[in-house]
Image: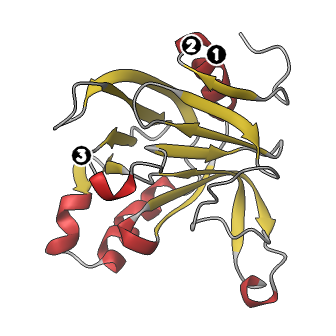
Amino acid sequence: MINNLLSEIPKSQDCKLLSGILRTLIGTPCLKIELGYADELTAHFGSPKTYRHPNLAEESRGSSILGSRASYWEFSVGNPPLLVSLDQLESDSSIEVERHAQQFNGATVIDAVTENMPVAGHSELGRSLLIRFSNGATLSLVPTDDPDNTDLPDWELFTPLGMHLMCGPGQSWSYLSSETNTHPSPAVPLTA
């Protein structure tokens, strides 16, 4: 278990440490889920924060931000459940996907778990992420085979403590200060 959530971990495969970091999401509300560049899904959690960049002055972000990066994403919302996935973007517009994602707004994270998962086209396993919410909704990120993005993490989490969790590719992950991050996410402007 991590005693100090400000301690950097350059590279690890320790599932217990990773679970400890992810547990910091439990009890936080989802502010919004949106689609970004290349249909990357971004989820904002916690307290709303304003961007420092003048072009984003009217926008807000979460104190924690999860990005799907090089992962397939899907979510389930409503009763009866409606499954919305990256695959649907070919038939549905991003506006329609974001409309369904509004059902996450205000729901609290009740669980965040990761597990080893086969990645098509690779002999190495990756780490999936499943987040469950108080309203019964779920959000799932599953690593995919993308030979053009071998340097990208499968998914990532920016924390309110100024830390950046990068999971994958493969089973390894790192937890570093977002100030020293060498692979910034397009979902989170550096001036945020």
In the figure, 34 relative to 150: above or below? below
Q: Percent x, y for residue 43?
A: 54, 55
Residue 77 can be seen in this image: no
First in sequence: mark 3 vs mark 1: 1
In the picture of the structure, the residue carrying the numbered disc 2 is: 14
Task: For the N terminus, give its image quadrant.
Answer: top right
Q: CA distance from mark 3 to mark 2?
A: 33 Å
The circle on residue 99 is none
Q: Quadrant of residue 191?
A: bottom right
Name the residue: 48% across, 53% down: 104
In the picture of the structure, the residue carrying the numbered disc 1 is: 17
Q: CA distance from mark 3 to mark 1?
A: 32 Å
In the picture of the structure, the residue carrying the numbered disc 3 is: 81
Mark 1–mark 2 CB contact (< 8 Å): yes
Task: For the C terminus, give its image quadrant.
Answer: bottom right
- Amino acid type, mark 3: Pro
Residue 14 can be seen in this image: yes
Q: Residue furthest bottom?
A: 55
In the figure, 173 relative to 58: above or below? above
- Amino acid type, mark 2: Asp
First in sequence: mark 3 vs mark 2: 2
